[in-house]
Image: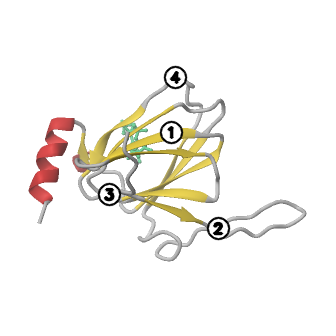
Amino acid sequence: MMKYNINNLIDLPLIHDPRGDLTFIEGGKHVPFQIARVYYLYNVPVDAERGGHAHRALEQVIFALSGSFRVKLDDGTHKAEYWLRDPRRGLYLKNLVWREMDSFSQGAVCMVLASKPYDEQDYIRSYDQFIVEVQKAKP
Ligand code: T46
């Protein structure tokens, strides 16, 4: 598969200390939006597949706080694949990006920072409908 940078990796600050490492996130500074919602996935079976949808307006940054998993992205033109395994490194997802997540390691924890509260109307759960809306959104 062709690799193409349709999204950005974000490296967070690290405060290293003999007592343990500390990383912090400020909305609008370390992520490109004010944080309206935080959620996390855990107890994910290693053979589970999550995602399988896009969002009309939502922006998010996804982190592997613990363990690792794969994120497959598709903006309707380009596809990309990321393995997240560093709690300091987040994957920024703009709106209108189809995402699929799998290959969760045992005990993986996925934390997501989101630009808006939960809204089912923001979801596009059909890939065909996603392509229609991507075409419509083109300048
Ligand atoms: C993404 C990946 C990483 C809520 O009630 N509130 C919430 O904030 C969320 C995120 C979900 N839900 C409900 C809606 C569904 O009934 O929880 C159920 C599962 O949600 P969803 O299908 O969104 O779960 P995932 O893990 O497939 O996808 C989510 C995000 O939607 C998605 O944008 O990137 O996590």
Q: Circle 4 sits in a helix, a strand or a loop, which is it?
A: loop
Q: CA distance from mark 2 to mark 1?
A: 23 Å
Classify 79 as above or below 5. above
* Pointer 4 residue Cβ closer than 8 Å to ligand 1: no
Question: Residue 136: x percent and y percent?
Answer: 9, 55
Q: CA distance from mark 2 to mark 4?
A: 31 Å
Q: Residue at x 44, y 29 (%)?
A: 49
Residue that mark 3 sits on: 58
Q: Residue furthest bottom?
A: 29
Residue that mark 1 sits on: 70
| Eye-nearest disc, 4 or 3 | 4
Which numbered disc, 4 or 1, marks the residue that appears first in the sequence? Answer: 4
Which numbered disc, 2 or 4, marks the residue that appears first in the sequence? Answer: 2
Residue that mark 4 sits on: 47
| Quarter of the image where ligand 1 sits | top left
Q: Indicate left or right for 13 with 118 as reference.
A: right
Question: Any mark on residue 24, and which?
Answer: 2
Asked if labels 3 and 4 touch by Cβ distance under 8 angstroms, the answer is: no
Q: CA distance from mark 3 to mark 2?
A: 22 Å
Asked if labels 3 and 1 touch by Cβ distance under 8 angstroms, the answer is: no
Q: Circle 1 sits in a helix, a strand or a loop, which is it?
A: strand
Which numbered disc, 3 or 2, marks the residue that appears first in the sequence? Answer: 2
